[in-house]
Image (tube, rainbow, N blue to C red):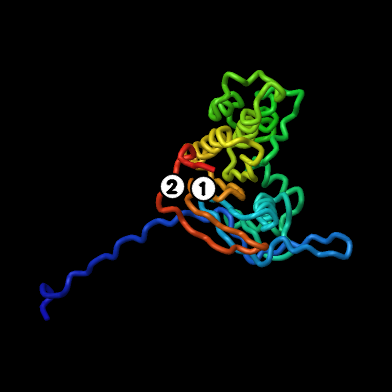
Amino acid sequence: MSQSSLPTRVTPPEPASRPKVVFEATEITRVYRMGEVEVMALRGTSLQLFEGEFVVLLGPSGSGKSTLLNILGALDVPTSGRVTFRGQDLTTMTEQQLTQFRRRNVGFVFQFYNLIPSLTALENVALVTEISDHPMDPAAALDLVGLSQRRNHFPSQLSGGEQQRVAIARAVAKRPEVLLCDEPTGALDVTTGVVVLEVIERINRELGTTTAVITHNAEISAMADRVISLSDGRISAEHRNLQKLAPHQIEW
């Protein structure tokens, strides 16, 4: 066969870039001992969270959602198994190293706002920026959650939804890579809850912050990229939303 008749080599297309893994949990168990009684909160749970995604962890009370979130955020440690953050093994870190990890990388939002009553909204946010490496301006963080006009108000002068938005501003002001939210709308009415969800969605979309939200409310899962369902300490199901709903489209 002449050289000119040789078949043309076709270069295969480059594989589509895959999102980077932020958290990876492998066969996590968590056992709590109360006297002679053992409670197994997690039973060999494995999952990955990817860069920039919005994940909802869905399940009833006692399913292991909060325990899993606390372990990912290094507020708790597993009884067995392994957790890594961008390849760093959290399960081998010292308490001091875990404190630094939380301070630098993770923002937490809880059901109850945990604001300091004697400080204004701006001062509550500023507390976090004082111990952060590359913080956001506290006023800018409050503007991000729509509270620039309420920065000098004390928590007692704010509604429940406004207090939760201050808590979110406080969490994101240190520019965390990950935002972990445990029932952030649990203490709020539907209308106020939608406003809070809009703020969390905006942070995920505009800042690219990897976001995980715990809820027992199945309707909220419609706004997620991916939904992970837990039951009795195990992941029982997982699916991706081909089409996400905006928070204002959710009814519950």
Label 1 and label 2: CA atoms lie apart by 10 Å
Q: Secondary structure at mark 2?
A: loop
Q: Secondary structure at mark 1?
A: strand
Which numbered disc covers residue 54?
1
- Residue 149: percent from the left, percent from the top? 58, 18
In the image, is residue 32 above or below residue 171?
below
Q: Amino acid at mark 1?
A: Phe
Q: Residue beneath label 2, please?
A: 244
- Residue 73: percent from the left, percent from the top? 66, 49
In the image, is residue 212 above or below residue 31?
above
Q: Amino acid at mark 2?
A: Lys
Which numbered disc covers residue 152?
none
Q: On the rendered structure, is 107 left or right of 21?
A: right
- Residue 215: percent from the left, percent from the top? 61, 48
Work out whether residue 135 or residue 43 is closer to the camera in this orientation and state it.
43
Res. 84 in view = yes
User: How crowded is the residue under tag 1: few (<14 C-alpha within 10 Å), some, or many (20+)?
Assistant: many
Mark 1 / mark 2, whichever is N-terminal = 1
Q: Quadrant of the C terminus?
A: top right
Work out whether residue 94 or residue 4 is closer to the camera in this orientation and state it.
94
Work out whether residue 200 or residue 195 is closer to the camera in this orientation and state it.
195
User: Quadrant of residue 145 in the image?
Assistant: top right
Dots 1 and 2: beta carbons under 8 Å?
yes
- Residue at point 69% right, 24% down? 123
- Residue at point 69% right, 35% down? 113
In the image, is residue 133 above or below residue 68?
above
- Residue at point 69% right, 62% down? 42
- Residue at point 49% right, 42% down? 250
Q: On the rendered structure, is 229 left or right of 129?
A: left
